[in-house]
Each structure stands twice: as C-alpha cells, then as structure tokens.
Image (tube, rainbow, N blue to C red):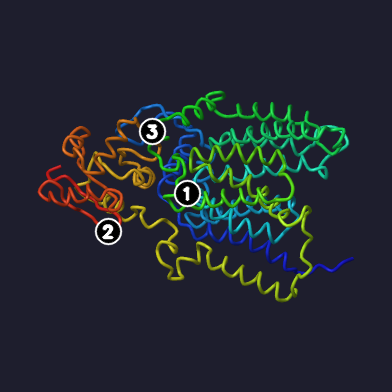
Amino acid sequence: MPQRTLTLDHVWLFAGVAFIALRLLLTPIQPHDFWWHMATGRVIMTTGQIPTVDSFSFTQAGAAFYNQSWLAQVLMYQIFALGGAPLTILVQAIMLAAAYGLLLRLSIRRSGAVRLSVGVLLLGTLPASFDNWLVRPQSYAIPLFIIYLYILTAWRDPRGQRASGLWPPLLLLPIFGSLWVNLHGSFVLGGVLIALTFVGELLRRWFSPPENNPALPPLWHLIPVGILTGLSWLLNPTGFAVLAYVRNLLGSSQVTQLVTEWAPPTIRTANGAIFFIFVIVGMVILSYARKRPDPVEMLMAVALLWLALGAARNNLWFVAVATPLFTRQLVLWRSGERRVTPAFQGMPLLNGVLIGFIALFLLLALPWVKPALGLPPEVGSLIAVETPVAAVEFMQRDAERPQRLFHAMSMGSYLIWAAPEQPVWADPRIELYPFAQWREYQQLSAAQDVERLLATYAIDGLLLSNSEQTALVTWANERPNAWALRYADEFTSYFVRVGG
C-alpha cells in the first residue's frame, strides 16, 4: 500500500481554497443589504410570519412588499444571534471557500491540471468575482449554482454514467431547487443550466452522432429532472407568485436604472475592468487552443456572458461556468491532450511547512483574532467603517431625536436593524419605493430643491453620508440657525431641525 505524503499539489490545492477564505475573512460586513435582511429575519422569527407589507418606512408604510429571500434572512439572523459579526463572517468564508473549492475540483476534473486550475482560480476567478461576495442572500445561492454546474458536468462525463436508468445524483437538483427558491431570486439559473445542458447536448449529437460517440449520456435523463426542478420552485410560501416576482424585479425601472450593480459593467470601474480583462484573456485562450471547446460549456459561457453584460451583479455566474472551460482550453493550448501531473512534488516536510504557513495567515484573519492585530480599520474592522453605528447610538440617546428622518440609502438598512423604532425614509429595498421617490432622493442628496422636498416629507432630521451626500451636508452646515449639527465623524453627519 503506497505511503501517503504531502505533495506540492496538496500545497497548491490548500492554497487555492485558503486564499478564497482569506479574502472573505478580510472583508468587513458591508452596510447596504445585510442589515435589512437581518431585521426581516428577526421579524420572521419573532412573529412566526413572513411580512407581506412594509413596516420599516414612513414613506411607504403598509405598501405591499414581496419578501422572496425569507429563508436566507432567517439563516442570517440565526447565525448573527448565535455568534454576532465574527460567526457571520466565518460562516461566509467557509461556505464560499467550499463552493469555490468544488469549482476548483471541477476544473481539475475537466483539465487534469492541478496547479494550472489553482492559478486560474486565484488569478482570474477570485478577482473577477469577489465584488459579489457580500454577506447577503445571494451568498447562499452561489454554492447551489456551483453544485448544479458540477452535477450536470459530471453527468456528461462518461466516467459518471451507469448502464441504465436515471443517474441518481441528478435527482439532487430538484431537492436543491426547492431550497434555492426560498433563498434568492437567482433560483431560475438552476433551470437555465439544465436547459443549456440539454440544448448543448443536442448540438453535440448534431456534430457527433451517438453511433460515432457511444459515450454520450442519455439525453432523456434531463427531461424528468428539468420538470421536477421546475415543480420544486412551487415549494415556497406563495407558489407561482415567485415567478412573477422575478419577472417584475428584472423589469423594475428603479432597479435597472438606479442600482449600480444592476447596470451593465463598464471599464470605468475597477471591477468592470477586471471583468473585461477576464473575458478578453478567455477569448484569447479559446482562440489558440488546439481543440474545439465543448459545445455545452461554450453554450453556457455565451448565455451567461450575455447575462453578465446586462448587469454587473451577474458576472459571478459567467465567471463560474467559464473557469473550468478556460482552464481546460488553456491546458490544450500547447498540445492537443491534457497535461500530465508535474513529476516534481517537493519534499513532504517542506510542503507541510508551507501549508502551516498559509494556515497561520488564516488563523490571524479569524474574526476573533483580526481586530487585535492593529490593522487599518478598512480591513481590521468586522463591520464596514462607514456603517453609522456610533451616529445611530447617539441619535437614540438624543433628547431632540427627529420623528421623520432623511438619510443616506445605505444607512436606512442599518437603521432598520439597530433602531427599529425609527421609521426610515428609504432603504436598499429598491423595488419597494417609487421611481419618483428615488429621483427626489438624488435631488436632495445633491442639495437641489431642498426646501420644497424637506417640506413635502415634513423632514425634521438628517443622517447623511459625508462622501455620498456632500452637497446636502454643506447646505445644512451653512444654515446653523435652521439645522443644528448634533453629531459628526469622518463618515456621517447628523442634523436636527432647530425648533423641531
């Protein structure tokens, strides 16, 4: 029996997963989506009901609101209640590191190249994806998407086939579908992956008839699995209404025109530039590979690239399907066959030291250890420094506390959580608020038509972002007889109308 030793490939594999986790451990909780989802999870747990109308704002109080991600909200709240921000960050790191570890395994399965697969993951997949690795319901959808991709790819591999009958792992897809539909609106992508696999396999049979390629998987397998997956979407509190929610969300002018991540990616932003570099490099790899790419993988990549070009938040889905495709074609770049595993595997003792060194970085990045290391606040804090924690605490103690507060949109999310007794003007539930109200938000933030808009909403307090609402902060500071500055720090200014 061969002796098991630590090889250099083991170091590469550990590094690939560890650096994904490290990136997540070093990312503080961002203020926009996290807190209002947490607050909704708290409402669900305390009342035993999923809210159907708005109870957080004074501008849209009682308006109907479809809360699709209720299960993710409950999970987020329970994790936070159990271990606060540290446990929340740790769970996020473990969950996404495991997901991208599975994607790494898929790349290795498709390419046969361990080190190259790790290199593509860390140099391409990670920088092109991590902007979407925020703590929010979408995080729970990422592992499910990669699981779908892995199972469907394994089904197409002749090594995963059986002589007859439905391949059992495919039956996991409807089970995961019933979970996904209650976690995040991206659940439809599971059905998209099944449909693209079906169409791609049809194309493969067109170019290579089954009699010439007996290793092709039985196409009929995808028909019952696709039907069962579609039916699994009905296992949610509102049945068919969840499909209407996705359709309405994609067609919402508030979402598509006002939310940056729903806008098409652009090279004018760092994340957009990284995404386009990933696409361009991938096109070069595909162009110079000596063998034609797999039609199913190409179809998935093209379809999800089209989705990513429509909205920046969709780039991670494209990057996930493109990672094994680009890795396999890169292996074939120099030769027509898969590369053999490198012979040099280093010394077991030194390999163990390298793994221990990487593990030490993970240990130091743990959320119970990191705050004590004296790192810059942007990295060392567990909660993003722009979150108005101190300002809200001051406001709650303020004897002149306002009744109708205008504030930065991201601050509305934290207010819902930390000061539920304080109704908000608006918050990141973009689709809840009318398009006209968001236009007024932009006007107020830019200090345009201020007096009329403040009077329209009877605003008696301002909680403003110094960076995002500089003009309005300046406007209020220039009127000390009308607006008293009650609190200010590097990120936030809090004003109260003089005389109430």
* Of pointers 3 and 2, the one earlier in the residue sequence: 3
Q: State the residue in front, 474 or 173.
A: 474
Quadrant where the N terminus is found in the figure: bottom right
Circle 3 — which element? helix
Q: State the residue in front, 12 or 86.
A: 12
Crowding around mark 1 (Cα neighbors within 10 Å: few <14, some 14 to 19, many 20+) is: some
Distance between the alpha carbons at the discs numbered 1 and 2: 31 Å
Percent x, y for residue 100? 63, 52
Distance between the alpha carbons at the discs numbered 3 and 1: 21 Å
Q: Which residue is mark 2?
A: 489
Quadrant where the C terminus is found in the figure: top left
* Of pointers 1 and 2, the one earlier in the residue sequence: 1
Percent x, y for residue 83? 51, 55
Q: Which residue is mark 1?
A: 272
**Disc 3 and disc 2 in contact, CB within 8 angstroms:** no
Residue type at mark 3? Gln
Label drawn at residue 254: 3
For the point 74% across and 47% down, the residue is 291
Task: Judge left or right: residue 415 versus residue 372.
Answer: left
Residue type at mark 2? Asp
Q: Dividing the picture into quarters, in which one does residue 19 lie?
A: bottom right
For the point 84% across and 39% down, the residue is 215
**Disc 1 and disc 2 in contact, CB within 8 angstroms:** no
Q: State the residue in front, 198 or 243.
A: 198
Label drawn at residue 306: none
